[in-house]
Structure formats: C-alpha cells, structure tokens
C-alpha cells in the first residue's frame, strides 16, 4: 500500500477511534489502567509513606537519591526498574528568545525534559546518557575495588535519531535503557529478558505518564484497544512491562502552575509529593501529597490551599514573596 493511502487510512481510523473512545473511555487526564506498569505504583504498595527526600537541587544530589531508591528496590528483589529524572542544562539556556543553546559551562540546573529543549530528542539524549551513566556508577558503587566499566551501545537506535541508547556493565550485570521508545520495548527489551540476574533499568521512557485518548483506549480489551495500540497508544507496551515485572522506583517531573515551577516526586514505596519553587529560585517548599499521581487540577488546588497565589502577583508586590 502506498504511503499516501496508508496516511489516509490512519486518519480515518483515528477519527473513528476518537469518536468511539470518547463515548466509552473516562477522562484522559489520569491513568485508569490498573496494572503497575502504568508507573503509578499506588496500586502495588500497601504500606506507603511520605518520602524523606526533597527536590534535588543538583545533579549529584539527584543521582544519590535515584541510586538509593534503586538499591532499596533491589534489596526487595526488584530487578526490573523504571526511573524518570530531570536533566542537567546550562542555566543560561532557560532564557527565551535565543536561537541556539550554549554548551554547558558548569552552571547547570535540573529541568524537565520537555519541548523547551531546542535540539529535540537528540539533545535530550546528550544530557540523559551521561546522567544515566552517573546513576549506574552510583548504584554499583563499592566501598573497595574499582567501579565496573560502563559501555554505551547506540546500535539499538536503528534510525540514529530516536535518542535511544543502552548502558551496560558486566559485574554486576546491569542494562540501563536510556529514553526507550515503545518500539524499543517491543523489538529489543522484551526479547532479551532472561533470568541471568541482570538488573534492567528503563530511564526516561519516551511515553508520557498522563494519558491521551489513544492511551486510555489502548489500555482496555477488545478491538478498540488493539486499534488504539496500533495507532500509537501505550497500552500494549504497559501490559507487557507489567507482565515482565517492571515497576517505577523513582519519578521526578515538573511543570509550571500558577506561574511557578512545581516538582512532583515519587520514590520507591512512597506517596507522590508536590513541591513549589520559592521566588529565590533556589529552594522548594512542600505543598501536598497524594497516593496516586496528582493531576494538574490537584496541584493547583494544593497551591490554593497553601495560600500560594500567582507568581506575577508576588513579582509586582500584590502578595508576599515565598
């Protein structure tokens, strides 16, 4: 079938699916998939607690937090882990209106891996790969002896531009997939699973935590679910990851709410914690927690309950500074 005809077919199928899914699928703002690979681990741990961690202010601090959670999960026998982290970026590159970004000069900040990265997924990879290597190095840190040698395999990215890589060590045996796609899971990860004791880590998967219509529809059963998965919904991938035993052990994400930077942090066997950045841009204050991932509306309500108004009002003196 010609590519043009395939495109027309996909458009027709997508429109049919949206109309059908809107009638049967609940709100897409929050995942309804009951399995643990939804990366909302509230359904898998009964004795949850508030995390002892706060928002990391440096790469080193974040790496230590991630490694600590990974070690705790490993001690419980969990050798298939999912982590989501912020990425280091030169502080000057956060300015709007620049046509290109400067190379990092050591003054880096931790920022979400969102659309603000002008270089796209490959620029994200250039930051994610060394961050992943540091996490693996910290996770395998030994009191004595040399740290294991870490090798990077880019052959798993057949196109060369999907921003996927594989970091491996031999002793102990670790495979850290950096920014895996749904295709990576289907074509590589699931076909290479075995019981040889290798710890497998998925770092910053390229599917979102929140669901759109396709994601919600693909997490059900039957014809609509299969069609939604065919069109890009993540449901089939999450089902396979769940069946293989993957669980999230560290998630740190962020966005802007009421004009301020907020951070969502969920660590192994702990509730989701929400933090709001102070106006000095250097520290964060906790504003609430939930057993499951808070929606944007949840976060906004937490800010209101904490008497945190819009940032512009604080900037012009209508409200006190945080």
Image (cartoon, helix red, strand yellow):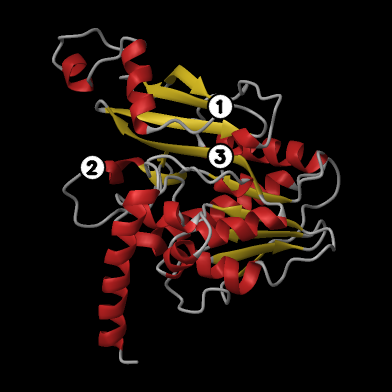
Image quarter (top left, top right, bottom left or bottom right) of the N terminus? bottom left
Mark 3 Cα-neighbour bin, 10 Å: few <14, some 14–19, many ≥20: many
* In the image: residue 55, left or right of residue 90: right
Q: Residue at x 51, y 55 (%)?
A: 220
Mark 2 Cα-neighbour bin, 10 Å: few <14, some 14–19, many ≥20: few
* In the image: residue 200, left or right of residue 162: right
Which dot, 3 or 2, sits closer to the camera? 3
Q: Is residue 179 visible?
A: no
Of 307 and 151, nearer the camera is 307
Q: Residue under label 1, please give it.
A: 291
N-terminal-most mark, 3 or 2: 3
On the image, the x and y values in percent for residue 45 come to 69, 32
Alpha-carbon distance for marks 3 and 1?
9 Å
Alpha-carbon distance for marks 2 and 1?
35 Å
N-terminal-most mark, 3 or 1: 3
Q: How many marks?
A: 3
Q: Residue at x 36, y 55 (%)?
A: 21
Checking the image for residue 95, the label placed there is 2
Mark 1 Cα-neighbour bin, 10 Å: few <14, some 14–19, many ≥20: some
Q: Is there CB contact under 8 Å for labels 2 and 1?
A: no
Q: Is residue 91 visible?
A: yes
């Amino acid at each position: 079938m010609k590519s043009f005809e395939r495109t027309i077919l996909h458009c027709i199928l997508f429109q049919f699916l949206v109309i059908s899914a809107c009638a049967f699928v609940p709100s897409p703002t929050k995942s309804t998939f009951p399995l643990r690979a939804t990366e909302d681990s509230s359904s898998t741990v009964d004795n949850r607690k508030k995390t002892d961690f706060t928002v990391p202010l440096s790469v080193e601090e974040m790496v230590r937090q991630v490694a600590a959670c990974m070690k705790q999960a490993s001690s419980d026998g969990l050798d298939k882990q999912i982590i989501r982290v912020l990425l280091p970026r030169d502080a000057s590159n956060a300015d709007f209106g620049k046509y290109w970004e400067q190379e990092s000069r050591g003054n880096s900040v931790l920022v979400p891996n969102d659309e603000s990265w002008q270089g796209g997924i490959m620029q994200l990879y250039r930051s994610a790969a060394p961050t992943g290597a540091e996490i693996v190095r910290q996770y395998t840190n030994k009191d004595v002896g040399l740290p294991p040698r870490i090798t990077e395999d880019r052959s798993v990215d057949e196109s060369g531009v999907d921003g996927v890589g594989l970091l491996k060590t031999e002793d102990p045996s670790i495979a850290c997939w950096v920014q895996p796609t749904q295709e990576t899971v289907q074509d590589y990860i699931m076909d290479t699973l075995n019981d040889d004791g290798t710890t497998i880590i998925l770092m910053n998967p390229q599917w979102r935590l929140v669901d759109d219509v396709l994601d919600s529809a693909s997490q059900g059963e039957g014809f609509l679910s299969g069609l939604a998965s065919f069109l890009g919904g993540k449901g089939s991938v999450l089902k396979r990851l769940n069946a293989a035993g993957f669980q999230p052990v560290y998630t740190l994400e962020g966005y802007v709410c009421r004009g301020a930077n907020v951070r969502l942090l969920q660590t192994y066997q702990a509730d989701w914690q929400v933090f709001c950045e102070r106006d000095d841009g250097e520290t964060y204050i906790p504003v609430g927690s939930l057993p499951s991932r808070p929606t944007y509306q949840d976060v906004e309500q937490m800010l209101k309950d904490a008497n945190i108004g819009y940032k512009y009002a604080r900037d012009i003196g209508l409200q006190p500074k945080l």
